[in-house]
Image (tube, coloured by chain):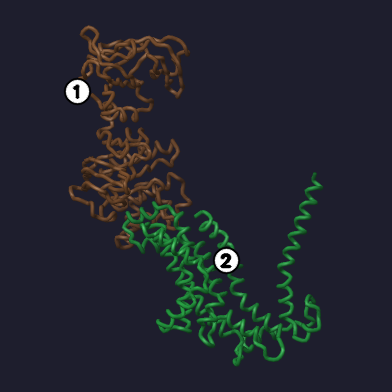
Chain colours: A brown, B green
Amino acid sequence: MSLELNNISKSFGAVNVLSDINITIEEGDFLVLLGASGCGKSTLLNCIAGLEDVSGGELKINGVRVNEVDASDRNVAMVFQSYALYPTMKVERNISFALECQGVPKAERKEAVHRVAELLHISELLDRKPGQLSGGQRQRVAIGRALVRNPAIFLLDEPMSNLDAKLRNKMRSELRDLHRELGATFVLVTHDQIEAMSMATKVAVLDQGRVQQFGTPFEIYHRPENLFVAAFVGQTKMNFFNGEFTSVGDIQGIKVGDTHIPLTAYSFEHEPKPGQEIVLGIRPEDIYEAETITPSANSFALELKVSARELTGGDTNVGFDFEGETLRCRYKSARMPAIGSKQKLLMDLDNCAVFDASSELRI
Amino acid sequence: MLKQRTLKTAFLYAVLFLVALYFIAPLYVMLVASFKTLTEIRNSSIIALPSEWTLDAWKKAWDGACTGMECTGIKPYFIATFEIAVPSVILAILFGSLNGYVMAKWRTKAADFLFAALLIGSFIPLQLFLIPLAITLRELDIFGTTVGLILIHTVYGIPLTTMLFRNYYVNIPDELVKAAIMDGAGFFKIFFNIILPLSPSILMVSVILVFAGVYNDFLFALTFGETGKKPIMAAVQNIVSSSYGVKEYNLNIAAVMISALPTLLLFLVAGRFFVRGLTQGAVKG
């Protein structure tokens, strides 16, 4: 079902944890609330769940205002970070507890539990206690507990942060499949951008209790609306270069130190004035070794000295001296350059982002 | 090197042995004396084993010893004590665990204040309460009754149990309660289905502490106890201090031993939980 957050704010005493949250998603969307710890994402999830009251704004599920509705009557289910399985109950009762609270007859409960257990491949675990399960199994049970109620919206609070890397990958695709199978609305909180990128249909990047950007994963990655989002999203941090907006001849561009990088191909939303301080953002993967690609109209050639390198597996992160700053770019590991050597590079300016230096917003 | 260590260990054990002996010796003397006849107590060494083992003193202490005019032994008082202790323990634990649950998991602004107030309450000397309690019991028309004593012990046990349960419940993750709220469980459903099943060790600690407190209570028993149904500590005092004829040491000792038995047994049976529960409830919290 659809979920609508209008101007949601939340404060604990004098501390504003959330302000001006506006997010709307449709039925079947997979919303990821992405942010560093302390950004308010879990509080927002608790507000949607009904475990915390909002201080202002309106919360709608399927078009109906639910601000005053109790958590259990909102038709939402939640998977907690610690899974929060009831330690003294067997898996079967853990899953059926919600139905028990609703007064569903025993036979029906049993049937529902078995249906869910089959879906999640945990049928053989029904007689165990949570303490006898592995991390991955516990997580499945936690999901099963949410699933059994057939909720309109699934809320997941960092459900994969307690799993090891391999299991996390597996659960990620399983969760994605589950979402597709059920066609239900999911809201997932995470600090892991890979989770956000790979699972979401919509991402809201949060910082300091505000939505910094709300959009599809593609938009978030390729059209960051401000410096925070640009810096937060991306495995290797985006390169930022401060400079003045100037023209050389009739070519407009940014002057970083002594280098003038043309921005003629960039479509400004708000064209800067000459002399304005702006920031050029370019992702490491948009800077290539000159030999490996053919230059296009929007590529900019550079020759720089290698200052640092870091092997990450398939790729090597290489740092270059560029006008007193470090320019990061990604090389294939097989072509790892020597430190101090000069390399010819091509910047692909098609995917760059330009921000105003003082407002930090995209221009 | 090795020799030095052996010597050290030997010395350590010697000290431990002596200390243990120091504590066990009086118990031994009492036990032995309770199985002797009165004449033998007077004539033999206090550490000598009885020449003829007899249970007479124990039997008499149980149902024949005199307190004042009545010669019923301590049996009725023993039973009366349980009539007081069992309801008091149950009620104090029921309210204490509910209090602790509310204070730990349904935090309100008042919770910290109330908790502090309860703690202070439990540190005030008992004697201060005597007169207000007497007036209260008189107004409720339960002065000198079993019900009155149950009420007193329940109220007096609640701060202790509240503290124990609160500190224990603080360590139960909040997410567990949140999950149950999402599942649609109410206040009591969460308490009885999720919180209480997690509490066996702290329950045992509470049973031991409250029971021992009620059982060993002398002041309230003496002041508010029902005539003829006084709790055991008051009755034992009466037997031991009654001064008709000769002092029957074997009888007095047997009475004291019987009266000490329940708490001793409780500690032996539940001591394991006690240590575990204490560290879980008190130290971590």
Tell me the SS state at disc 1.
loop
Q: Is residue B157 above or below residue B237?
A: above
Give residue A7's quadrant in the image.
top left
Type of the residue with mark 2 = Ala
The quarter holding residue B259 reads: bottom right
Which residue lies under the disc numbered 2? B270
Where is mark 1, residue-wise?
Answer: A270
Q: Do callouts 1 and 2 point to residues on the same chain?
A: no
Q: Position of residue B20 (x, y in %)?
A: 72, 64
Q: Considering only vertical position in the picture, is A176 above or below B171? A: above
Q: CA distance from mark 1 to mark 2?
A: 76 Å
Image quarter of the N terminus of chain B:
top right
Query: Measuring 26% from the left and 13% from the top, which residue is drawn there?
Result: A262
Please name whichever residue, A73 or B234, is drawn nearer the observer in this view of the structure: B234
Residue visible at 39% across and 36% down in the picture: A169
Instruction: Say what secondary structure mark 2 lies in.
Output: helix
Left or right side of A62 for B164: right
- Mark 1 chain: A
Residue A128: in sight, yes or no? Answer: no
Query: Dot 2: few (<14), some (14–19), or many (≥20) neighbours within 10 Å?
Result: some
- Residue B50: horizontal and vertical position, in percent? 78, 80
Which residue shows up at 46% across the image and 83% down it?
A: B143
Q: Nearer the viewer, residue A97 or A47?
A: A47
Give the residue at the far left of this rendering. Answer: A63
